[in-house]
Amino acid sequence: MVLLLWLAAFAGTTVAAGLAGSAYSTDYAVPGTESGQAGALLAKAFPDQAGDTDTLVWHTAAGSVRATAVRATMEHTLGKVARLPGVASVQSPYGPGGGQQISRDGRTAYARLAFRSSPDDLPAAQVGAVVRTARAAAGNGLQVELGGSGIALTQAPHDRLPEIIGLCAAAVVLFLAFGSLAATLLPIVTALAAVGTAAAGITLLGHVMTLADFAPMLGVLIGLGVGIDYALFIVTRHRKGLRAGLSVQEAATRAVAVSGRAVVFAGVTVCIALLGMLTLRLGFLNGVALAASLTVVLTVAASVTLLPALLGLIGTRALGRRERRRLAADGPRPTAANGPAARWAGFVERHHRLLGVLAAAVMLALALPALGLRLGTSDQGNDPATATTRKAYDLLADGFGPGSNGPLTLVGSLDGAGDRIAFDKLPGTLRATPGVARVSGPEFDGGRTTGVITVVPDGAPQSRQTSDLVTRLRAQVLPAAADGTTLRVRVGGVTAGYDDFAAVIVGKLPLFLGAVIGLGSVLLLLAFRSIGIPLKAALMNLAAVAASLGIVVAVFQWGWGSEALGLGRAGPVEPFLPVIMVSVLFGLSMDYQVFLVSRMYEEWRLTGDNRRAVRTGLAETSRVINSAALIMIAVFGAFVLSGDRIIAMFGIGLAAAVALDAFVLRTLLVPALMHLLGGANWWLPAWLDRRLPKLSIEPPPEPAAPAPHTGDRPPAGVRGPAA
């Protein structure tokens, strides 16, 4: 029945999503900012410019674009493009007033291409026809390229290569861990069922709220990672029960009752961290938060419902053939606490001070580049060198200056003759302003209540120089020009939008971090009845975020290997990347914290011996944590091949964070600190313990004789064996 219900849910949502179609948004604007107000005024005053405007660029290797042959070829091509479906207009440089669209050396020219729809509503097939028609004119020394947000639709990744590579790598890790093909397939099937259902649900969600175009890929990335990991923990516990002589049903029941509770707790922490993005009150991030949370909820549901059903379906084949034969011949045998994991746990116990210092030094060194983090939005200048959008961007920058790829739009609200006179004088003032390359306009709407001036900066859209120009215009030049009038001029355009977006994110970051860290810490406080455990978890999570952001800065902002990886040239880090990374990483790192510390806590409650608790917890969980981490690293790392810069940022950042979290923090720095603090790890004031509600991650352990007490004894007020 469970299998049929999941099949019906998957089929139903998939069919509904297919019939409804997608409705994702590429508009990351922040309402209420100055650039957002400028854009709204411009759309209202000039509705004919509401569609998407792109650029068609051509360049001659020798001669001039004014040559008869080149002009004839391109005029014919532009005429064909203008007649294609979806094209509103084409402004040729060969027409009246088009001289500014030809470079000074005469070797580069561009045409403005206006579509009838915005990029969110623009059919990719129409854009593809424009690209094919335009590029057919290339040859005989003539280069033709296209750029713009509409043209970028033809370069959006459509293949499933990252998911396939990630799943194959995860299957290899699972098979090495389990030695059973049936057990290997279970986590993958469970994750695919959850992620597939969630992907269809996200498509439907896009019709009722603003949903960023990268939300589905991000949901798949998170869902595959946590889905396979959650199933791995439950299957590992199930196999342990089978080896202990339990029946298939008893082993599955115990696995869900023990590891399943930890999975639910971990899933709740992930959702809390993701929903922390709602505190930012940014429309498109709200959609991202809900979409990712939906994926996590479904992966948890699949882990505690679909997975047990599949465990019952495969029976004892969850164990490998050799294990089944040994179990049948010799009966159940206790699992010996030995092997590499036990030896490592003992090594950490003996050298915890030295190892703790080394781990902290590694994390600090990797986090240093994050101090130079510069938030901004990548543009087509960051596309791979082979992309037509990148080539068009470079041709415009070479022929017309780097600022031509991101002009500033100054939109003035005019009320009376004094405002119009001041606005008419403004272009002369702007031409004398440092950092301004060219000025065109002003243009007015029909009622002359709104005016527009276009300013081309000296610097590229992503440069600090252009950001400084935006600040100078807003703080000095425009207020001085409007002095004595009611004129209000707003600065919009690419760079202004980037800067406004980053400023909003940075301003709300403290509230966001406080909400995510605070709620996660409260959950850990309730679960482990300790002040120290939540504090260490918060510090470790911040360390993982800082170190992974340092790696992202080195690769994407400094350009260390970005071109070699096919990720384009260096550029700023997306403003929303730290927010989403913090949400995802706080949730995922809580998983490892829960699975590691819950076993330590269980042993501490039995024995009251901190050294034994830390050693046992590390020895018994490090293998499964490392296996889970390898799976997540493989899944996240594969998304570097997506061809999408934003998704590649997430992939590299999350893969690096998981690697550091699992192999440096959870299996080295955390146990080293817990050895150093001794019984104080578990300290909780008695008065607070009495007032806190009880929250148990795992069911009470079966009674066991306490081991000889040789380590730290709990200080006064600590829950020890008697508790």
Image (cartoon, rainbow, N blue to C red):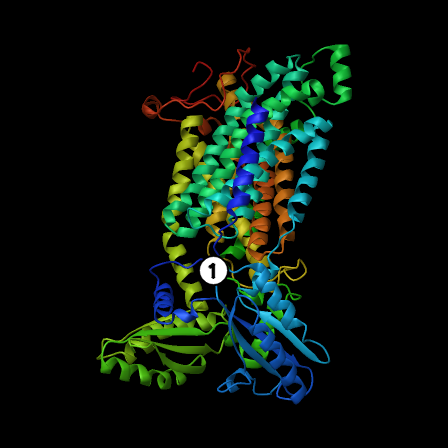
Up the image or down, 24 lies above or below 164; here it is: below
Q: Residue at x 39, y 60 (%)?
A: 503
User: Residue 14 location in percent, x, y?
Assistant: 56, 39
Q: Is residue 568 left or right of residue 379?
A: right
Residue 462 falls left or right of residue 324:
left
> How far across and how far down the image is residue 264, in percent?
49, 28
Q: Is residue 78 above or below residue 498?
A: below
Q: Is any atom of residue 173 visible in this view?
A: yes
Residue 570 visible (yes or no): no
Image: 328 above or below 233:
above
Q: Which structural element holds mark 1?
A: loop
Q: Tag 1: residue type?
A: Leu
Q: Position of residue 54 (x, y in %)?
A: 53, 70
Quarter where residue 163 is shown: top right
Which residue appears at 40% of the width and 27% of the height? 526
Tag count in the figure?
A: 1
Rendered image quadrant of residue 408: bottom left
Q: Which percent across, then down, holds residue 174?
A: 68, 33
**Considering the image in quadrants, where does the N terminus appear?**
top right
Q: Residue at x 60, y 74 (%)?
A: 80
Dividing the image into 4 quarters, which one contains the C terminus?
A: top left
Q: Up-down: is 88 above or below 560? A: below
Q: Which residue is mark 1?
A: 375
Q: Nearer the viewer, residue 32 or 25?
A: 25
**Number of other residues with Cα within 10 Å of mark 1, as a class: few under 14, some 14 to 19, many 20 or more:** many
